[in-house]
Amino acid sequence: MRRQLVAGNWKMHGSLEANSSLLQALVAAAPAACDVAVCVPFPYLAQAQQLLAGSSIALGAQDCSMHEQGAFTGEVSAGMLREFGCGYVIVGHSERRSLHGEGDAAVAAKAERALAAGLIPIVCVGETLQQREQEQTEAVIGLQLDAVAHLLGRHAARIVLAYEPVWAIGTGRSASAAQAQQVHAFMRARLGHRGVDAGSVPMLYGGSVKPDNARELFAQPDIDGGLIGGASLKAADFLGIVDAARSH
Ligand code: PGA
């Protein structure tokens, strides 16, 4: 039985003051019965770790190095994230893939480092609008998944996948529940063909999830929660989305 997970991706947003009120509001609401995580910018990990201590809300980061340690100026290792209490790390977000040139091999290497450090990687996949219009959605996502299939083969329940259509991220234009479900079902089938126990892999949907569309998305049989960008910065919206997940 897969549990629902709602993970906030703050991206490059926040300040000590804003984080403090946001996290205090989340902790006060004490979400339970589904897993909740917030993935914060690196400098705020210590603050978030402190404010979330003793709560059921897990901490995560938004990226990690593919290397264990060494002369990699500006990089942050998975082991360092673990030291600050992280349980999750997002890898292969489309913004990293497109703005920082991260390819499938780098994403797989980061996921492997995260696993080795005891973190759960949230591996993002998704197609651009152009790829969707050219009917390449399954081909693109298939290759993105193949790159991590060997890891999923060993750790199916310790890796989270997030389907995030690039055209739905930050645009206010979510995929419909039917579109998202179709891709999620394809992802399970593809992984099944690669010998992965696909039924135990948690799969999130991300891209313009809001309190008013979350319920229908999360009701789909192959969708196990959401990766939430913009709406994770407002306590009321994020908690509304958590509520939607809780009811499944
Ligand atoms: P969004 O972002 O919810 O603002 O569309 C989702 C994401 O990028 O993870």
Image (cartoon, rainbow, N blue to C red):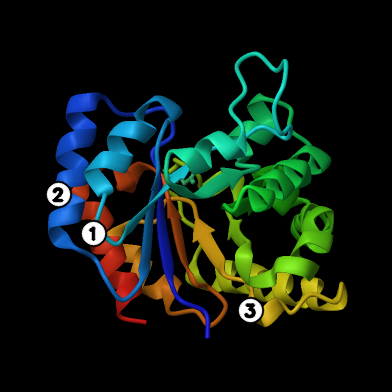
* Distance between mark 3 and mark 2 Cα atoms: 32 Å
* As drawn, 167 above or below 244: above
What label sits on residue 239 in the rendered view? 1
Mark 1 or mark 2, which is nearer to you?
2
Q: Mark 3 points at which residue?
A: 200
Q: In which quarter of the image is the C terminus?
A: bottom left
Q: Mark 2 points at which residue?
A: 25
User: Which one is earlier in the sequence, the residue at label 3 or at label 2?
Assistant: 2
Name the residue rendered at 28%, 33% in the picture: 47
Name the residue rendered at 30%, 65% in the picture: 242
Q: Do the residues labelled 1 and 2 touch (CB within 8 Å)?
A: yes
* As drawn, 200 above or below 169: below
Q: Position of residue 38 (x, y in %)?
A: 37, 48
**The quadrant where residue 129 appears:** top right
User: Which one is earlier in the sequence, the residue at label 1 or at label 2?
Assistant: 2
Please, what secondary structure does the residue beneath circle 1 have? Answer: helix
Please, what secondary structure does the residue beneath circle 2 have? Answer: helix
* Distance between mark 1 and mark 2 Cα atoms: 9 Å
Please, what secondary structure does the residue beneath circle 3 have? Answer: helix
